Amino acid sequence: MSRLRLGVLISGRGSNLQALIDACADPGFPAEIVRVVANVPGAAGLDAAARAGIATATVDHKAYPGREPFEAALTAELEAANAQLVCLAGFMRLLTPGFVAHWRDRLVNIHPSLLPAYKGLDTHARALADGVRFTGCTVHFVRPDCDTGPIVIQAAVPVAPDDTPDTLAARVLLSEHRIYPEAIRLIATGRACVEGERVVVSGAGLPDAAVNPKI
Ligand code: GRF
């Protein structure tokens, strides 16, 4: 079985990265992480990657005169590792339409809300302020507008009456760690394909030929 080659972009602690590392540790998982790139020097997730024996790189956005040259350096790192799918995992930089187009249908993100609700930052505080009974998390293919794009998988998470943004974030994070590897499994096995601007998920047991032709 050839495994889908993942590049992971992070900015911070990297708990979703760790969930992907743990999933890929199973030889039966259909993907492997070939490079982890951080835009923040010393990001904690880099240590987790190094501990797992994964090649890492730091591309500090502050060292570049603009977004395009910064993103060109990101793409160079990812392509040097022959990454086939790029996973944003707490990557806190907005991406230009050019970068998103280059990686179209080969770039996924995890977001801590049930998109299209609560795009952007402070999702949990806003959900609590609205009094919603459920929130959750989403893995989606990336399109140029922030936190938009075809949805691969979502998990709904109940809101408790006494939740704070921190307690709610912690509960949602548990679901993030479950669905991100599951989304990668669906994509890597060709079960999740972008058709139009939606992801169509097909049944289990497909032949190898069903693997996503775009990747
Ligand atoms: C997660 O909540 C993710 O959904 C969001 O940023 C956070 C990153 O956390 N995009 P971590 O670095 O994966 O622990």
Image (cartoon, rainbow, N blue to C red):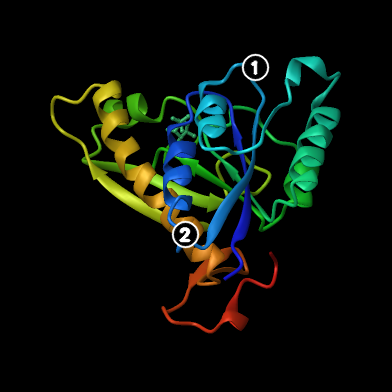
Q: Which residue is pictured at 57% across the width and 27% down the height? A: 46
What is the quadrant of residue 40 in the picture? top right
Of callouts 1 and 2, which one flags the residue occurring earlier in the amino acid sequence?
Answer: 2
**Mark sitting on residue 27:** 2
For the N terminus, which image quadrant? bottom right
Quadrant of the frame with the C terminus: bottom right
The residues tagged by marks 1 and 2 sit, at their Cα atoms, a distance apart of: 31 Å
Query: Is 129 in front, or is 102?
Result: 102
Residue 196, picture quadrant = bottom right
Residue 111 visible, this orientation:
yes
Residue 82: percent from left, percent from top? 75, 52
Can you say whether 21 is above or below 164 in the image?
below
Q: Residues within 10 Å of mark 2 (few under 14, many from 20)?
A: few
> Which residue does the image show at 67% across and 55% down from the upper left?
106
Asked if residue 62 is positioned above or below residue 98 in the image, the reply reads above
Position in image of residue 124 (x %, y %): 34, 29
Q: Is residue 152 left or right of residue 59?
A: left
At horizontal 57% and vertical 37% (from top left) the residue drawn is 53
Q: Is residue 195 above or below residue 62?
A: below
Q: Does the beta carbon at disc 1 come under 8 Å from ligand 1? A: no
Q: Amino acid at mark 2?
A: Pro
Label 2's element? loop
Q: Residue furthest left?
A: 161
Q: Which mark is residue 19?
A: none
Relative to 71, does residue 207 appear above or below in the rendering?
below
Q: Position of residue 132 (x, y in %)?
A: 25, 38
Q: Amino acid at mark 1?
A: Pro
- Quick check: can you spot residue 114? no
Question: Which residue bears the numbered disc 1?
Answer: 41
- Looking at the rendered structure, the secondary structure element under dot 1 is loop
Residue 193 placement (x, y as % from top left): 57, 69
Near-viewer residue (195 or 57): 57
